Amino acid sequence: IEETLIAWLVATNGRSDCSLTLKCSSFNPTKTGMKIKQMVERSHDRAKEMLGESFVSFSPVLLCDKILQDQFIPEFYMNSQYFITASKGEAFNLPLAEAMYYGLTTLAPAEGGHTLYCNDKNSILMAGQWVKAGGVEGNGRYDNAGGWYDVNIGTIVDSIRYCLDNDTSKEAASGQAAVKALLPAIRNANLYA
């Protein structure tokens, strides 16, 4: 989350026409709220450092540190335009599928379980590299316990800027269709009761 926040702050430097809602929930909201506040402060410092003299201002960041009840999830997505995930280890990535279902332009790593339904025609895929656990870099896939796919901040910044500067409605519509087509398979697999 922190790298995505830093990337957003850098990509939207000086813009007042956009904001970011960070959805970070936990079963301990007080502890999570304190951690998120510290993360936002660190992210502001890091983004200013990355921007250097080109820093103008940050776009607003709204924090949602509560677990959303099911009836509020549609409103959460329908009040958004983009969904960014730079997760290093999601399997299916249900929030990404939900965002696509509600017609958001999605930005996601080029590797991961979500590539079952997410591709370069219906999402903005961000290239990265496989990193072996313990910080040793390498090429190729690792087993679940052995590594993750890492997208660097610069790639996330470039992807956000691309979305803000271009019409991505075609990708969003294609993503929505892809996820809706996947729903019968999900229901048949009894993933949802």
Image (cartoon, helix red, strand yellow):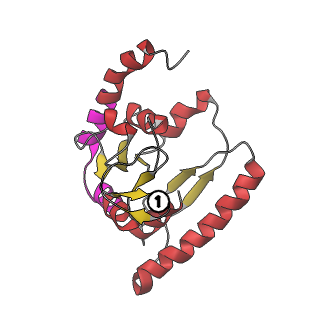
Q: Is residue 5 visible?
A: yes
Quarter-wise, where is residue 103 in the image? top left
Front in this rendered view, residue 73 or 29: 29
Image location (x, y in percent) of residue 66: 67, 43
Vertical position of residue 80 compared to residue 11: above or below: above
Kindly identify the amino acid type of the residue bearing the numbered disc 1: Thr
Q: Is residue 37 left or right of residue 190?
A: right
**Magenta segment:** 160-177
Furthest residue in direction top, as rendered: 188
According to the picture, the residue beneath numbered tag 1 turns out to be 4
28 falls in the magenta region:
no
Residue at image coords 60%, 65%: 40
Residue at image coords 44%, 49%: 85
Image location (x, y in percent) of residue 6: 48, 66
Q: Is residue 55 visible?
A: no
Residue at image coords 50%, 56%: 20
Q: Residues within 10 Å of mark 1 (few under 14, many from 20)?
A: many
Q: Is residue 28 left or right of residue 135?
A: right
What secondary structure predominates along the stretch shown in magenta?
helix
Residue at image coords 44%, 58%: 18
Quarter-wise, where is residue 98 in the image? top left
Q: Is residue 44 left or right of residue 124?
A: right
Q: Secondary structure at mark 1?
A: helix
Number of numbered tags placed on the structure image: 1
Image location (x, y in percent) of residue 171: 26, 41
Q: Is residue 68 left or right of residue 1?
A: right
